Image (cartoon, helix red, strand yellow):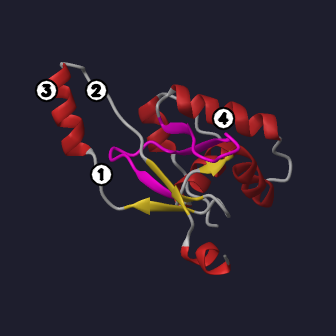
Amino acid sequence: MKETDNREIFNRYGIKNTRQRNIIFNILKKADSPLTAEQIFLGCKKLDDSMSFSTVYRILNTFILKDMVVKTSITEDNKSMFELNYEEHKHYLVCVSCSKMITIGHCPIEDYENSLQKTTNFDITGHKLEVYGYCPQCKNKK
């Protein structure tokens, strides 16, 4: 993976630009779906053998505090997962057999959220949607 310098992004969020932060941020940028801390750590080890798991966690927590990364628990074993905080939120289909995650291309509950807000006067600030089932490969194995 080609290492990209994210100096401008880090400056915008008011954090120091370091090689280790760049490695983790670039791993998250290239990910198609949320990653566990272990997956991020394994990706880091390929690029910087000296990086520790605690360093990965510290950097992820910094990114979360600065609202650069979203932490969520999607898997059945309740492991935390991390992804960049894009302006558009994402929803996922999650395979209960292999844990594969497929991004749903649109938000199917946006209209419902607006309706709820009007009828309940509840100030909704966000939502998550995960749909569980079997991916095509696992479904064919059954």
Residue 124 - label: 2
**Name of the residue lying farthest toward the right:** 50
User: Which of the two discs, 1 and 2, labels the residue nearer the N terminus?
Assistant: 1
- CA gap between label 1 and label 4 equals 30 Å
Q: Amino acid at mark 2?
A: Ile
| Upstream in sequence: badge 3 or badge 1 | 1
In the structure shown, which secondary structural element does the residue marked by tag 1 occupy?
Answer: loop
Q: Nearer the viewer, residue 57 or 35?
A: 35
Is 116 positioned to the left or the right of 27 in the image? left
Q: Residue at x 81, y 45 (%)?
A: 51
Under tag 2, what secondary structure? loop
Label pair 1/2, CB-CB below 8 angstroms: no
Is the residue 75 above or below the residue 115 in the image?
below
On whether residue 41 falls in the magenta region, the answer is: no
In magenta stretch: residue 71: yes
Q: CA distance from mark 2 to mark 3?
A: 10 Å
Viewer-side label of 2, 3: 3
Q: Which residue is mark 3?
A: 118
Given residues 39 and 59, the one toward you in this image is 39
Identify residue type, mark 3.
Lys
The residue positioned 62% from the left and 58% from the top of the image is 96
Residue 24 at what x, y percent from top left?
64, 48
Give the labeled residue for mark 1.
Answer: 107
Q: Of tags 1 and 4, which is closer to the observer?
A: 1
For mark 1, does the 10 Å Cα neighbourhood hold few (<14), some (14 to 19), or many (20 or more) residues?
few
In the image: residue 8, left or right of residue 28: left
Q: Which residue is mark 4?
A: 59
- Displayed quadrant of residue 85: top left
Q: CA distance from mark 3 to mark 1?
A: 18 Å
Mark 2–mark 4 distance (CA, rounded to whole Å): 29 Å
> In the image, is 108 to the left or to the right of 51?
left
Quadrant including the N terminus: bottom right
